[in-house]
Image (spheres, rainbow, N blue to C red):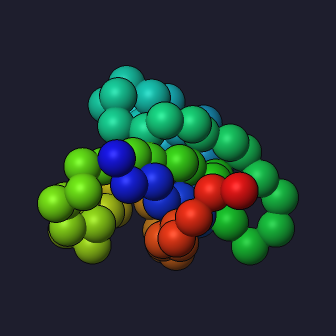
Amino acid sequence: MVPFFVQIKCQLGRSYEVANALADAEIASEIYSTAGQFDLLVKFYVEQATDIGHFVNEKVQKLPGIQDTQTMICFKAF
C-alpha cells in the first residue's frame, strides 16, 4: 500500500461536513482538523498500481464543500 496525504481547504462553514463525507466514504485512513491555510489533513492508502492523481480527482475533489486541495506523496516512513 502507498500512503499519501491531502490537505483540504473547505468552503466556509463546511469543514465538519467534508470530514464526515470522507469518513462515510471509507476511503481515508485518518482525518484531522488543522489550523492555517488548510482545514483538514487526510491520510490515504492506495494500492501500488493506483494513479494517485486520478484517485484524488475522482474520490476527493468531487466531494461537496471542498474548495482546494494539496497532495503530498510520501517516499519513506521512519
Rendered view: 1 above or below 10:
above
Q: Is residue 4 visible?
A: yes
- Give the residue displayed 72% in from the left and 45% down from the top: 33
- Give the residue displayed 24% in from the left and 57% down from the top: 48
**At which x and y percent is residue 10?**
56, 59
Q: Is residue 17 visible?
A: no
**At which x and y percent is residue 22?**
42, 37
Q: Nearer the viewer, residue 48 or 5?
A: 48
In the rendered view, does 67 fall on the left or right side of 52? right
**At which x and y percent is residue 31?**
59, 39
Extreme right residue here? Answer: 35
**At which x and y percent is residue 66?**
45, 59
Q: How many marks?
A: 0
Q: Nearer the viewer, residue 12 or 22?
A: 22
Rendered view: 31 above or below 61:
above
Rendered view: 48 above or below 26:
below
Q: Nearer the viewer, residue 74 or 43?
A: 74
Quadrant in which residue 16 is drawn:
top right
Quadrant in which residue 12 is drawn:
bottom right
- Give the residue displayed 20% in from the left and 67% down from the top: 51
- Give the residue displayed 53% in from the left and 48% down from the top: 43
Quadrant in which residue 62 is drawn:
bottom left
Q: Nearer the viewer, residue 66 or 74?
A: 74
Quarter of the figure with the C terminus: bottom right
In the rendered view, does 6 fall on the left or right side of 54? right
